[in-house]
Image (spheres, coloured by chain):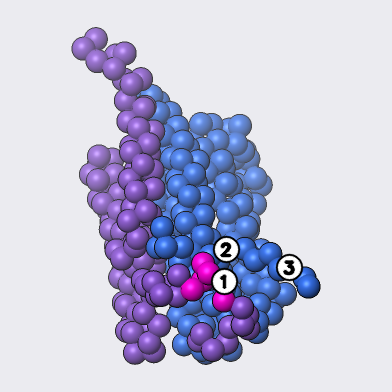
Amino acid sequence: MTVELEIPYNVHARPETGLYNAKLGVWLFLASEVMLFGALFSSLILIRTSAEHWPRGWEEGLNIPLATLNTFILIASSVTVVLAWANFRLGNVKRGRLLLLATLACGFGFMIIKTIEYYAKFTAVPPHLPSTSNFFALYFTMTGLHGLHVLGGMILFAYLSGPGFKMWEKEPERYVNRIEVVGLYWHFVDLVWIFLFPTLYLL
Amino acid sequence: MSEHIASEHVSAEEAIADSVVPNPMHHNDPEHIRKEIRVYLTVFGSLAVLTIATVAVSYLHLDVRWAILVALSIACVKGFLVAGYFMHMLSEKKLIYAVLALTVFFFAMLLWGPWGHHYDTFGR
């Protein structure tokens, strides 16, 4: 007789919490993420309010049209992931998977545009580097950390729409929950950008 | 969807959870999900309009105080839409609110922190 060790409460809610464990786990992780980005926003406020002069984003040559396009891309990707979740629950597997791939494509789009922006900064004369000024130090640190989060999300979507998809056949509810928690993470990444965009580019 | 579940072995824990309702926050009847989808699309439209608004206001080159007030107000509304509807915070479990209440408190401390720097110079 073999003994199967199952991870508890990854489908059904744990009675004490009313939540399946992954969901509580991802919210705790997001709480730590709020503190991580919060520390950077706090630094930005400190450095900016201490400076005699602080440039507005456009004065430093930040590309507002491209960043606006990136904002649209991230918002669209938040919608595609939440629609993927809804479609899997409806049993529209094909559409759900396509929406996951669309989310991944949005991630690619965001990173390509970010690369174009970074390239323009590095190749400007004189170049704009993290060491150029406090403004660019903060710009590169904050957008760089955010970009790493986008990259992390892309890996998750590539996995869930690729090799990780086979879970749907055996444990559809668990798979749907995975989409939900990855979605929560992705919406958080979108949320951070919603504040980063005006703070760095427009103000 | 439950008929897809492969495991025939229902553990005691699962039996309890089942009696509690698997995912109480997620109504899985198709009509409800379709309604959700309409909400998501409406939120998407609102976020797009607010993004255009925040960029349009930035081209007015307002005084920096007003620019910060307007841009961050719009960002807060957008943040509320994403957290409230996409992340379902408007209909979450108490435990998540408790976690977030702590997060909000410590986040507020982080944003309040920089003011300590200015206390040194107040009144001088």
Q: Are marks 1 and 3 in contact (CB under 8 Å)?
A: no
Residue A119 lies, with reference to residue A160, above or below; the image says above
Rounded to the nearest whole Å, what is the CA distance between mark 2 and mark 3?
A: 15 Å
Q: In this view, does B20 lie to the left or right of B7?
A: left
Tag 2: Cα neighbours inside 10 Å, few (<14), some, or many (≥20)? some
What is the span of residues highlighted in magenta in the rendered image? B10-15
> Residue A3: which numbered mark, if any?
3
Q: In this view, does A144 lie to the left or right of B97?
A: right
Which color was chain B given?
Answer: purple
Measured as percent of width and height from the top left, residue A107 is found at: 58, 66
- The residue at 21%/12% (across/down) is B123
Q: Nearer the viewer, residue B80 or A13?
A: A13
Please, which residue is most extreme toward the front here?
A1
- The residue at 37%/53% (across/down) is B95
Measured as percent of width and height from the top left, residue B122 is found at: 24, 15
Locate residue B11: give its quadrant: bottom right
Q: Which of marks 1 and 2 is in front?
A: 1
Tag 3: Cα neighbours inside 10 Å, few (<14), some, or many (≥20)? few
Pointer 1 residue: B11
Locate residue A16: give its quadrant: bottom left
Judging from the image, what secondary structure is the residue with disc 1 in?
loop
Asked if the magenta segment contains residue A100, the reply would be no
Name the chain under label 1.
B
Q: Which of B76 and A123 is in front in this view?
A: B76
For the question of whether residue A6 can be seen, the reply is yes
Pointer 2 residue: A8
The three-letter code of the residue at mark 1 reads Ser
Q: Main secondary structure of the magenta part?
A: helix
Q: Nearer the viewer, mark 2 or mark 3?
A: 3
Q: Are marks 1 and 2 in contact (CB under 8 Å)?
A: yes
Name the chain under label 2.
A
